[in-house]
Amino acid sequence: MKLKSIFAIFGLLAIGFVMGMLTSGQLMKSKVSKIAKMRTADGLEKRIYTLLDADDELKARLSPKLKPYTAELEKIRQDHKRSLMPVFDSIRVELESELSSEQVEKLDGLMKKLRRPGPPKGKVRSNGKKRKKPLSNE
């Protein structure tokens, strides 16, 4: 009888731990997703409208005022990304002599992803890895 109680307690603790981890992961994903969506001009504008509970009338009044700033932020983001390219090239040159051909291919794949223009593509997990299939149609 005492053994069953111990197993039940440890079982409940394990279930609670797993549920806590899953809940924490979902909360983190949600917060990261909101921030990632703000990296685009449209995403930032939509986030502001959501934050303000803007109706169509308010959106119509704010849109002309927001457009220049969202365009400016997009230009800054693109310029920043372009300024990183020489750093990526230097990293590859510096590391290439220390890596196997397979590792160089993996590094080239990463550099290719980093060079891609525009906002990030696909769903990204909280650990930074892409999902093979999206969880939902957001």
Image (spheres, rainbow, N blue to C red):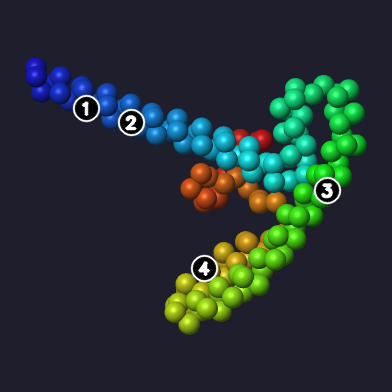
Badge number at residue 33: none
Give the mark, 2 or 3, whose residue is nearer the N terminus: 2
64 with respect to 84 (left or right): right
Horizontal side, residue 75 vs residue 38: left or right? right
Circle 2: residue type: Phe
Q: Residue furthest bottom?
A: 97
Q: Are marks 2 and 3 in contact (CB under 8 Å)?
A: no
Dot 4 surroundings within 10 Å: few (below 14), some, or many (20 or more)? Answer: few
As drawn, the label of residue 106 is 4
Q: Are marks 4 and 1 in contact (CB under 8 Å)?
A: no
How far apart are the two marked residues, 1 and 3, measured between alpha carbons?
55 Å
Mark 2–mark 3 distance (CA, rounded to whole Å): 45 Å
| Mark 1 and mark 3 residues within 8 Å of each other at the beta carbon | no
Image quadrant containing the N terminus: top left
3D distance between C-alphas at marks 4 and 1: 42 Å
- State how far apart marks 4 and 3 are (Cα): 34 Å
Q: Give percent across and percent down for residue 118.
A: 73, 55
